[in-house]
């Protein structure tokens, strides 16, 4: 993956031009389908209607807008239209997705992980509670 972020004077959204290298070649339909199934991604890519991700469209919203999906012009697709390298444009509100929502999603995933994983101390590991004076700590 090769992202490029260009800082321009916009109120509150980042835009990145991204080149993705896949583990196997895929068609544009397969790439779009994979992106559309991604959590927190909204496809905004209407070439006929000239509708693509913009900072204004992303501002004040949680999803990252993705569009301008196309094969990397530096690599020719095969005869079936498959390519392993794809270019796309992504816009996201850095205050919502870039900070606040990311923190919530990380906390939710960490909480889900904590519910499924039982942590046990290693043999011989001694744990002292911080609220217990060192002199009365269990041995």
Image: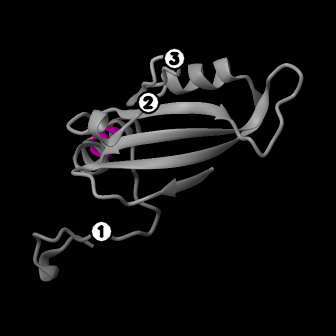
Residue tagged by mark 1? 127
Q: Is residue 112 above or below residue 21?
A: above
The image shows residue 102 at horizontal and vertical percentages of: 30, 45
- Camera-side mark, 2 or 1: 2
The magenta span reads: 105-109
Q: What distance separates the C-alpha of mark 2 from that of mark 1? A: 55 Å
Residue 83: % across, % down? 78, 32
The residue indicated by pointer 2 is 52
Q: Is residue 65 left or right of residue 70?
A: left
Q: Secondary structure at mark 1?
A: loop
Tell me the quadrant of the picture where the C terminus can be found.
Answer: bottom left
At x 44%, y 69%, the residue is: 124
Q: Is residue 115 shown above or below 12?
A: above
Q: Taking the image as drawn, is residue 37 in sight?
A: no
Residue 106 on the magenta segment: yes
Neighbourhood count class around disc 3 (C-alpha, 10 Å): few under 14, some 14–19, many 20 upward: few
Can you tell which of label 3 and label 2 is closer to the viewer? 3
Q: Position of residue 130 (x, y in %)?
A: 16, 71
Neighbourhood count class around disc 2 (C-alpha, 10 Å): few under 14, some 14–19, many 20 upward: some
Visible residue check, residue 109: yes
**Image location (x, y in percent) of residue 5:** 46, 57
Q: Residue at the spot x=87%, y=28% of the render?
A: 78
Element type at mark 2: loop
* Majority SS type along the magenta span: helix
Q: Residue at x 40, y 69 (%)?
A: 125
Q: Which residue is mark 3?
A: 48
């Amino acid at each position: 993956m090769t992202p490029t972020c260009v800082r321009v004077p916009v109120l509150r959204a980042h835009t990145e031009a991204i080149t993705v290298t896949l583990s196997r070649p895929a068609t544009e339909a397969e790439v779009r389908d994979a992106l559309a199934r991604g959590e927190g991604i909204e496809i905004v890519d209407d070439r006929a209607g000239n509708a693509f991700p913009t900072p204004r469209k992303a501002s004040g919203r949680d999803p990252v807008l993705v569009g301008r999906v196309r094969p990397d012009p530096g690599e020719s697709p095969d005869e079936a239209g498959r390519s392993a390298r794809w270019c796309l444009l992504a816009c996201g509100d850095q205050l919502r997705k870039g900070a606040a929502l990311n923190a919530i999603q990380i906390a939710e995933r960490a909480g889900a992980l904590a519910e499924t994983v039982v942590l046990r101390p290693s043999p011989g590991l001694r744990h002292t509670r911080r609220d217990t004076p060192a002199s009365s700590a269990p041995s």
